[in-house]
Amino acid sequence: MSPKPIRKAVFPVAGLGTRFLPATKVVPKELLPVVDRPLIQYAVDEAREAGIEQMIFVTGRGKTGIVEHFDIAFELEQTMSERGKDLSVLECTRAVPGDVIAVRQQVPLGLGHAIWCARAIVGDEPFAIFLPDELMVAREGGSGCMKQMVEAYEQVGGNLISVLEVPMTQVSAYGVIDPGAQVACSGATLTEVRGLVEKPPQADAPSNKIVSGRYILQPEVMRVLENQGKGAGGEIQLTDAMAKMIGTQPFHAVTFDGARYDCGSKVGFVEATLAIALARPDMGDQVRAIAIDLLK
């Protein structure tokens, strides 16, 4: 039997964004623009490319702007229309009624808890998870990260996570997989996952393959999270819940064929902005000239 389709995606966006203060005192971190699109827009665009229909935002206090971004701004659109402005630039912010849903994470208890907060909407379906801080950019002419994962999921089913390789000196900052055998899969590099460890000491890390912010999980993970105890950092870790499912369901890692930018850090955010601006045909040459001039 073919696996159930991936129709829903969960976006945990309740974080306070303290590393970007004072910019995030009022503006949610996920609405900070990389060139001219906010971070959350890149993630939603990636989800739509993969055929996902329903976006579930797990928000917190002060994060209503994320949902409003995908609402109709009547006054703005009326003014633009009266002035003859092109409204197509707003097309990506439009959502079909009912396809954008917000739930509250009232207490900051970690990523696992944030995902659990969406359990009633996810229901008994497999679902995707996007961490918007991780900006995944497809190669020119290639598919986005989640589309690659969905295509692999359609072949092997079960649970999938995206991974990439980092220097061993960096593994203690991430969830790390214990890799098994390579799995035959058209269109993606697929590896069996034998285990998961959240933020291991470098000496104990089973590999340098880190989990990179995209997941496809079966709904049983919600039942595991229901009684999940606190893990690394005193938080309810999604990695711990996934580790308990290994061996009971298929579990694979997809090595994303594209670029990844850690927009949870200031340097990564600047790197993403430069990379995307340089790749834009409408401004790439000008930005390159500016960068060269600044580096003199």
Image (spheres, rainbow, N blue to C red):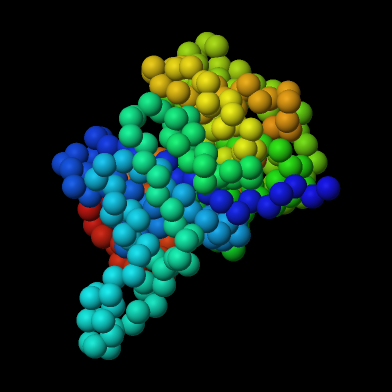
For residue 256, side relative to residue 30 (left or right): right
Q: Nearer the viewer, residue 108 or 215?
A: 108
- Residue 255 shows in the view: no
- Residue 294 shows in the view: yes
In percent of width and height, residue 30 lies at 33, 48
In percent of width and height, residue 118 lies at 48, 41
Q: Residue at x 36, y 41 (%)?
A: 104
Q: Where 58 falls versus 45 (above or below)? A: above
Q: Nearer the viewer, residue 285 or 259?
A: 259
Q: Residue at x 69, y 32 (%)?
A: 251
Residue at the outermost right position: 1
Question: Which quadrant of the view contains residue 185?
Answer: top right
Q: Residue at x 80, y 41 (%)?
A: 184
Q: Nearer the viewer, residue 74 or 199?
A: 74
Q: Where 70 falls versus 154 (above or below)? A: below
How many numbered tags mark residues here?
A: 0
Question: Which quadrant of the view contains residue 92?
Answer: bottom left
Q: Residue at x 45, y 17 (%)?
A: 230
In percent of width and height, residue 232 lies at 44, 17
Residue at the outermost front position: 120
Q: Where 223 falls versus 82 (above or below)? A: above
In percent of width and height, residue 144 lies at 56, 54
